[in-house]
Image (cartoon, helix red, strand yellow):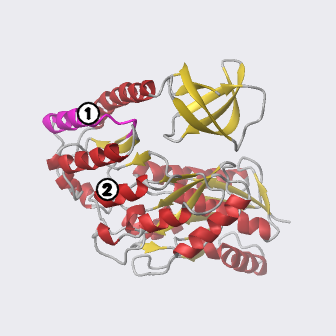
Amino acid sequence: MRSVAFHNLGCKVNGYEMDYMQQVLKENGYDIVPFDTKADIYIINTCTVTNIADRKSRQMLHRAKKLNPEAVVVAVGCYVQAGTEETLKDMSIDLAIGNNRKKDLIPILEEYLAKKESSDRDKTLKGKTIIDIGSTHEYESMKLTHTAEHTRAFIKVQDGCNQFCSYCIIPYARGRIRSREMEEVTEEIKGLAENGYKEVVLTGIHLSSYGMSGGVDFTTSRLLSLIQRVGEVKGIERIRLGSLEPRIITEEFVRGLSQCASICPHFHLSLQSGCDTVLERMNRKYSAEQYYEKVCILREYFNQPAVTTDVIVGFPKETEEEFEKTRQFLQKVGFYEMHIFKYSRRKGTPAAAMEGQIPETVKALRSNVLLELDREMSRKYREKHLHKKAQVLFEEEKIIKGRKYQTGHTREYIRTAFETGENLSGQIREGSLTDFLEPDILLFRP
């Protein structure tokens, strides 16, 4: 029996695809072992969203080869897809598999292993299977029965992106928008519900484009219909959504969400900048004021929803005045949490060729300002939920300050802890949030 070790980098879509690859290898008789142990095969599911992601992908590939120089090291996914020629020059990589071929991992891997054995274990033998991702219209079909997380299942329903933001390489690595059939999604979720999962997270590279055949008219998205179908699945008590395009937030869409009892009032609307001139340079297709109107619609239909976002600091030509506009806008919106990123120059994107690249020292200073603002806003949001009823899905046991707690999340994705020796994993309990245990954890009392 051959042993296989996995390491995953990047987004929740990558996580779903890795869960699937592990599943099919197990079904075909492979032994899954921890990554830091000696294995016959190492599979690294790579990311290329930033230069840092590229570097981490290379580091993990090299680390795998050092763990066992005789092993087959397989590089899979976005880093391979976006940088094919450079990737294949890396002596740590034996087999490169691009996007939309992960479903075919078993035949690809076994064909490579057979060739390697027939060539007297030729150490120079390299393999690759990389399609023209920009031309494919095929949705890569996968189906999970279990996921790496025991209480929450991430479900990939969409792939690709047509937006071409000026800083982003992902449309080149993932191709154009493609969607999974609604019946396939609901059948997979029915199976997961039967296996005890109570919460699902619908995710995709550009989730708001679900069901679209092209273009940018978000009124043609079938995402709401998909959510409503998932809401009918017996056993699923919570539906959470991945990152949403702000333009999909309309009165009709949000009204429909509010009528779905299982939808979680936790919405991630990617912003990137609160300054219109920066948004234009980024090729984002909305203004700051339009974004704010979308947040107001969510708050009209949901009571204190958790609104989270992404922000890039130090985008090319970003002045102090533009940065200050962003800071003030973030304060005006009052987010629950923000993911702050320092702009990373990504070869092959329009932004990489722009004049006015910002020094790293300036990016770091601006990032620190927003990280402090994030801490302030996050605490204020959590304070609003103190001494109020909450529904918590418990996930795992944690030792915090020397004491044993069951930890989980509310519907708004506030992390909570309940001091008990009872195993509550996978159970939903109602109670109230009484105090701060740590800055990002609230105490739960049934």
- The quarter of the picture where the C terminus appears is top right
Please state which of residues 425 and 115 is positioned toward the viewer in this rendering: 425
Work out whether mark 1 precedes mark 2 in sequence or the reverse, and give the earlier one: 2
- State the residue position of label 2: 249
Q: Position of residue 251 (x, y in %)?
A: 29, 56
Quarter occupied by residue 76: bottom right
Q: Is residue 202 magenta?
A: no
Q: Is residue 23 above or below residue 266?
A: below
Residue 83 in view here: no
Q: Main secondary structure of the magenta part?
A: helix
Judged from the image, the secondary structure of the residue bearing numbered disc 1 is: helix
Residue at position x 64%, y 52% in the image = 198
Q: For the residue carrying disc 1, how many other residues have a C-alpha within 10 Å: few (<14), some (14-19), or many (20+)?
A: some
Examine the structure image and report whether residue 323 is included in the region drawn in magenta: yes
From the viewer's side, name the closer residue of 167 and 214. 214
Say above or below: 36 vs 43: above
Question: Which residues are the magenta region?
Answer: 320-339
Residue 364 horizontal/vertical position (percent): 32, 32
Q: Is residue 209 left or right of residue 197?
A: left
> Is residue 128 placed above or below 270 in the rendered structure?
below
Examine the rendering and report whether any part of residue 61 can be seen: yes
Residue 362 is tagged as: 1
Q: Residue at x 52, y 59 (%)?
A: 13
Q: CA distance from mark 1 to mark 2?
A: 34 Å
At a point 42% along the width and 26% down the height, the residue shown is 384
Judging depth in this view, the residue of 432 and 347 nearest the camera is 432
Residue 15 image position (x, y, % from top left)? 58, 56
User: Is 188 or 364 nearer to us in this picture?
Assistant: 188
